[in-house]
Amino acid sequence: MMNKYRLMSPGPTPIPPEVSAAGALPIIHHRTPEFGEVFARVNENLKQVFLTENDIFTYAASGTGAFEGAIQNLFTPGDKVLVVNSGNFGNRWVKMSRAFDLEVTELKYDWDVKADNDEISAKLAEDPEIKAAMCVLSETSTGTVNDIKGFARATENVISIVDAVSGLGACELRTDDWGVDVVVAGSQKALMIPPGLGFVSVSERAWSAHEESKMPRFYFDWTAAKKAYEKDPPQTAWTPAVSLVIQLDLALRQILDEGVENVFERHVLLGRAAREGIKGMGLQLFGPDEDMNAAVTAAWVPEGVDGKQLVRLMFREHGIQVAGGQGDMAGKIWRIGHCGYFDSYDVIATIAAAELALESLDHPVELGRGVGAAQRVFSRSGVAV
Ligand SMILES: Cc1ncc(COP(=O)(O)O)c(C=O)c1O
């Protein structure tokens, strides 16, 4: 049988056909009014997705690059920071902060639990020299979404930095209402375009810290980015990834046409359906069974099943690319990505394929139990997805 390819990974994610097609258009020059018009609209529309009035700088870099830029622009070597580490990406920010000679207070959690905002408050109270705190919104490696509203409250006296690489445009994040100083995002998740753009939003308080920071920097220098951003029409300091920006323009318009609140609601339903599907087929969820976990769903690989084989089989036999576990969880968990261009049938098809793959791996499964549970989430929601 022909297998239709379905990318169900937590990034890169599938791209709407119109957005893919826009990537193939002839390239335009970036120092022109034509590009300026697109970039101005992208900047304004990004603000609506970040839910902020802050400046948002766009880099030809992945999310890790934009995060590195945030560290370079906010700090001076020796500065103290608190970093929440509850997964692969929190762990990356610990390592990156140390690489830039920051003094790190690491708050480490098991991968299947959320950050505890009371503990974060207490740690900050213990050491008033800590300048900033970092936390991941959606820990893509585990599927767990941290309570960033509470995090922003707990860190109100320091600079709050949130990694929203897989969360932005999928999970509720109200940058200005909640008072998050710096939000970092990437293009290849819920923003529905290919990998290659990194974004950072910068509050006034973060800008003041930037003005005092003495970390060496060049490519990611926010001052250079702001100077270019404030031109009329706005520009980037260096050559932008022109085709990606043009694709982003279309993707953002699709997101805003759907409505940011509706996008959040769709992701809540996709997550709920994925969790019900997993439980319905008799598997155990990894992490809390909560609607907040709207970007990625992770599940334990059942006893006696080879996790890597399960992921390979779902791709080879069913055309569905899910992801395995990262780091210590490799082979132990598997993950379904549903942040971005996903609908109900993507989740239902994934659950169907997982049931079939488990059956062919001799794991007892009653075909259709998971599928039915996922379908019921949508049929009960009263929302067309
Ligand atoms: C939560 C999170 N943070 C950071 C990153 C790193 O981003 P990138 O791979 O774009 O550098 C990722 C990528 O998967 C992510 O999911």
Image: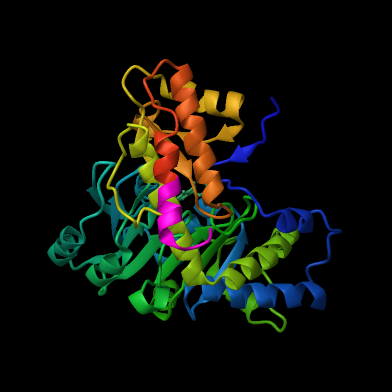
- For the residue pair 135 and 229, the one nearer the viewer reads as 135
Residue 310 lies, in percent from the top left, at 47, 24
User: Which residue occupies 60% across, 65% down?
Assistant: 58
Q: Quadrant of the N terminus?
A: top right
The range drawn in magenta is: 375-385
- For the residue pair 52 and 317, the one nearer the viewer reads as 317
Q: Quadrant of residue 313?
A: top right
Q: Quadrant of residue 218?
A: bottom right
- The secondary structure that most of the magenta stretch takes on is helix
Establish if 239 lies above or below 319. Answer: below
User: Which residue occupies 60% across, 24% down?
Assistant: 316
User: Which residue occupies 40% across, 52% down?
Assistant: 377
Q: Is residue 216 visible?
A: no
Establish if 50 lies above or below 351. Answer: below
Q: Is residue 67 left or right of residue 293?
A: right
Residue 36 lies, in percent from the top left, at 75, 76
Judged from this view, the residue extending furthest toward the right is 26
281 falls in the magenta region: no
Q: Is residue 192 left or right of residue 107?
A: right
Q: Is residue 22 left or right of residue 288?
A: right
